[in-house]
Image: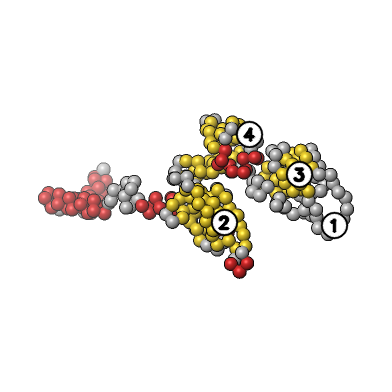
Amino acid sequence: MQMLRRKVLEASRRLPPLFSAASGGRAHAVSSLAASSARWAPPATAGSLAAAPWTATQRRGAKMLGSDVKLGNVIQRRGRIYQVIKAQHSHQGRGGATIQVELRDVDTGNKIVERFRTDEALERVFVEEKSFTYLYQEGDTVTLMEPETFEQIEVSKDLFGKAAAYLKDEMKVNLQYFDGRPMSATVPQRVTCTVVEAQPNTKGLTAQPQYKRVVLDNGLTVLAPPFIEAGEKIVISTADDSYMTRYIRGSLIIFLLYPKTQLK
């Protein structure tokens, strides 16, 4: 027991004193507190200069080339935030490839037309994407359901653009949000449709694959290989309304002989 007390006493002697003197110790504590206070800064509040870089990063996003601009993208142009509502690529001889886009100001709703070089650097704005289930539409209003909370929301049909023709019951769709507001909506890249009208198949060998116009159950007209008949199901690319594959007995049969074709 005495040996244990001796070891504790020796250990306590090796420890540095907390305060060398009463007044000196208090002065040391105050100076240490002041130094730590000087090194610490309160967190930046919204709108402060310290918060500006974070805000700028959230709004401006990353660089993208003009060739990568697509329908629904949100970009920053001359200090304004725009959404791409139309995009058309073109090539003007020696002038090089360009893309003509129709932009909508997200704040004012005003529309402008711009032309970008395909190698021109643009500033894309980050958006938040959320998944929903399509329920139904009435007029120009589309009703969607959040799959986890089952909460229903109504959005404008215009958010889907021409892709609204592909909406079907219980289809999974995505909404792109900016500043808490839905800016655009997208459908799956591939959608299975039923052919309701098709021209008769004309037999004969040709140097190049021949396509014919077919009418889908959503009312759209697309080009398809000649062997496609009314009543068949085919898979369509919703990006450009082009034929991709034939749908047979739950399987996708890809015909490499007929490349993806867009209706002109």
Q: Earlier along the polypeptide chain: callout 2 or callout 4? A: 2
Which of marks 3 and 4 precedes in the sequence?
A: 4
Instruction: For marks 1 and 4, give the CA distance.
Output: 42 Å
Q: Amino acid at mark 4?
A: Glu
Please name which of the two marks, 1 or 4, marks the residue nearer to the observer. Answer: 1
Residue kind at label 2, given as amino acid type: Gln
Contact between marks 1 and 3 (CB within 8 A): the answer is no
Residue 74 visible, this orientation: no
Please report whichever mark, 2 or 1, sits nearer to the chain's N-terminal start.
Answer: 2
The 10 Å Cα crowd at callout 1, few under 14, some 14 to 19, many 20 or more, is few
Mark 1 to mark 3 CA distance (whole Å): 20 Å
Front-most of 8 and 36? 36
Q: Amino acid at mark 3?
A: Val
Question: Which residue corresponds to mark 1?
Answer: 206
Q: Which element carries disc 4, helix, strand or loop?
A: loop
**C-alpha span from label 2 to label 3:** 29 Å
Q: Would you name the residue on which mark 2 appears?
A: 100
Residues tagged 1 and 4 counted as in contact (Cβ below 8 A): no
Identify residue for label 3. 214
Packing grade of label 2 (10 A; few <14, some 14-19, many >=20) is: some
Q: Residues within 10 Å of mark 3 (few under 14, many from 20)?
A: many
Q: Which of pointers 1 and 3 lies earlier in the amino acid sequence?
A: 1
Mark 4, residue position = 170
Is label 1 in a helix, a strand or a loop?
loop
Say which quarter of the image contains residue 137.
Answer: top right
Q: Amino acid at mark 1?
A: Thr
